[in-house]
Amino acid sequence: MSDANCRGRQRSVESECAILAATLHLLKQKPLREITIEAIAQKAGVGKATIYKWWPSKAYVALDAVLGHMKATVAAPDTGSAKQDFTEQLKSLVRFYNSRVGQIFKQFIAEGQCDPEFSKLFRERVLAPRREVARAMWQRGVDRGEITSDLECEIVLDMVYGPSIFRLLAGHGPLNDQLAETMIAALFGGIGRPLAPLAGSPATGKGE
Amino acid sequence: MSDANCRGRQRSVESECAILAATLHLLKQKPLREITIEAIAQKAGVGKATIYKWWPSKAYVALDAVLGHMKATVAAPDTGSAKQDFTEQLKSLVRFYNSRVGQIFKQFIAEGQCDPEFSKLFRERVLAPRREVARAMWQRGVDRGEITSDLECEIVLDMVYGPSIFRLLAGHGPLNDQLAETMIAALFGGIGRPLAPLAGSPATGKGE
Amino acid sequence: MSDANCRGRQRSVESECAILAATLHLLKQKPLREITIEAIAQKAGVGKATIYKWWPSKAYVALDAVLGHMKATVAAPDTGSAKQDFTEQLKSLVRFYNSRVGQIFKQFIAEGQCDPEFSKLFRERVLAPRREVARAMWQRGVDRGEITSDLECEIVLDMVYGPSIFRLLAGHGPLNDQLAETMIAALFGGIGRPLAPLAGSPATGKGE
Amino acid sequence: MSDANCRGRQRSVESECAILAATLHLLKQKPLREITIEAIAQKAGVGKATIYKWWPSKAYVALDAVLGHMKATVAAPDTGSAKQDFTEQLKSLVRFYNSRVGQIFKQFIAEGQCDPEFSKLFRERVLAPRREVARAMWQRGVDRGEITSDLECEIVLDMVYGPSIFRLLAGHGPLNDQLAETMIAALFGGIGRPLAPLAGSPATGKGE
DNA sequence: CTATAACCGAGACGGTACGTCAGGTCTTCGC
DNA sequence: GCGAAGACCTGACGTACCGTCTCGGTTATAG
């Protein structure tokens, strides 16, 4: 009764580890697209069938490999200021994007474009935990009255993370600490110029 | 002597059109990843070598195919209000994302993840023109004093488009008109609550 | 103490029977080449290892399966005439070759071509008993003076059975009762025309 | 206009030769059963697909390989005596069976047992030519009055060749020159003892 | 009555080969 | 001399079985 189904030989933990380790090693050398199941199997000293038995495709193996060797890399700062929290987290995120492992994340999103199943798994296993942390940060900000409460949390999160992920994927601009700071600042303050803080000024500045 | 090199048979326009048409037709049926050069060649009634001669990979063919049959789909509203302009454009963009052709854009970004060359081309041919239009909208807003001028344009654009593209690629939330409106509104107003409006001041300061 | 080695659980008769039955059933559906140990194991509700423990390869299992369910199908006529005996036996043999089980014999000979061990077993278990019977028929013929005694029995038997087995394996001609009769008649009478039946000397007519 | 269909690259003669040579080389080392398409492809320096394009299975490749490098090994003696002719030919045949290439013939017959298509091809390409030669020998014998004309040629041929092929395949007895001589002699003379050359007694009624 | 041992089913394992597919290159023609 | 057609080599695909190896569990004898 060691596992669910007791009958038959048990799944080899060594094999699983070898597969994940080999995959991770390969992922550091070349993009997921150029990695083959055969290469993983050979490097891990494992039969191809063993991989196919437990994972639907190499993307799933890669996801497991990355998740396994990377726990709790999500920074969850609690500085007392929501703006500060978001800035810190985005900075750590940006640094992660620029790291070698971070580059793999791009591959996952790319992979999800023609495998909805994988996309879903990626959201659950990768995105969700990070958003959970961010959601707490948001909640604290709302509770403390630092963030307007009339916005859905999900939208706020996308506004926080979307721009940098866009840059990560499209590569049209730099990704660095300064960007993180600027973005969060702009997001909190708004990009619209505060209409006439003065009395009796040209009120209708913005429109609406 | 029609072109630069006069000797020999000229590049067949029929072939090029047939290839692009075939590619476009296939792109409407299945994701780019599942399309093969062979399939394009066969459908176009063309040798594989002819394709390889003019395009480096199927992604480039697909890009040409999509760009060829899709001129000026980018809305460039000029309502007099930057906020309004951005809202309208984002709404049209969101509708485009949800269209069949729009789905192909995801594939292009995905393809760029392991082909920097293609990523660059995609930015130049697809992203750049759209950002040019948006940049004009932004400039008008700045000139009219509706947008703070202390922010780099590129950053503003990423804050406008990033969140919806993130949703397009990760699929973790809906993409619709209401989202566009909410996001632009939040972006202009900022998500931070105006800190402690002093006694007797115009409380809801920000707007809307 | 039932068998040689006493300790431990005894070999399961049910398993053995199930294996042989399953094999026989499969042999009636497809050639031996296309049968797999896995298929036998699954059909018999038995572990693969159990098969490997008792038989070296599927050919041996098949041989046991066929021999088990097919006792004494070899006709051993004793009509008083050797020629008649051989004719009858060859006719029954030809009918057997044309039967479904008979077709399996071809597979065994084929299997023996690259497994001398199996070829030997096949000769001992299948060929030998039949030849024993035929040898008795031949002996009776010799004793009765119907068959020339200057020929080795083995050669005679091969001359009797060889041609029809050749047809069975190469499939270049029909296999039926009439063939059996004609062949035995020709064999007994010889295919050489007795030269000069005239003029007193039937003497050296046939044979050297 | 070199071949039937002119367009496109021509079939590579080098590849075909390399494939056949490699196959022949392998056939001299191990039985056909243990040869893999992959091994042939690798040894020939050729893609697997190229083999699959032109031959349905390795058996067909092997047949072509053997036939290509082995022309006119069929002895067609014409000594003036049919018995002598058959004896000579069977002797050469027996020697061939014992040769290395001759052993491959067994494999072909074995292969034919579960591929009727191949069996047919084998008969046409291998058996038929040899039987054609033998048929001529038979005809000469009949014309000269040495062989009874009341027997179908095909049956005679099977009686000539069947026994030795049986020995080749079952391996239950030796295959040598002496056997060839004995068999042809017995076949011509018949194995039945000439019924009582005594005066006027049709005695034992064997003859039918 | 217990310990020991050989058996059993199930099934995961490292492998090998399968036959297919597509990639990208080349060769041979027709225009 | 370009462009079509298509044969070529390559290499990975995902599958099927191979024969071996744990597993947990069962049955039989030996002590």
Image (spheres, coloured by chain):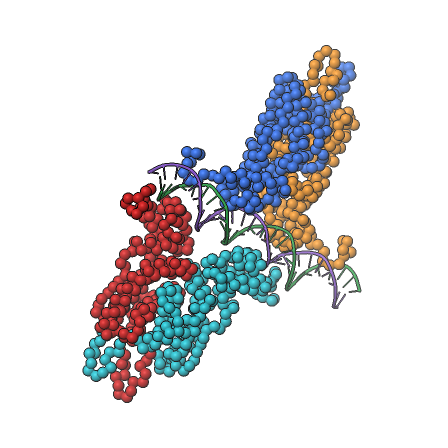
Chain colours: A cyan, B red, C orange, D blue, E purple, F green
The residue closer to the viewer here, D208 or B153, is B153
Q: Residue at x 74, y 14 (%)?
A: C201
Occupied quadrant, residue D100? top right
The percent position of residue A120, horizontal first and vertical second, equals 43, 64
Occupied quadrant, residue B86? bottom left
The residue closer to the viewer here, C143 or C32, is C32
Occupied quadrant, residue C186? top right
The residue closer to the viewer here, C205 or A32, is A32
- Say above or below: A83 vs C132: below
In what quadrant of the picture does the N terminus of chain C appear?
A: bottom right
Left or right? Give the position of A124 relative to B18: right
In what quadrant of the picture does the C terminus of chain C appear?
A: top right
- In the current view of this chain or complex, which residue is farthest to the bottom? B199
The percent position of residue D17, horizontal first and vertical second, equals 53, 38
- In the current view of this chain or complex, which residue is farthest to the top? C199
- Say above or below: B145 vs C76: below
Q: Residue at x 35, y 59 (%)?
A: B122
Q: Residue at x 77, y 30 (%)?
A: C139
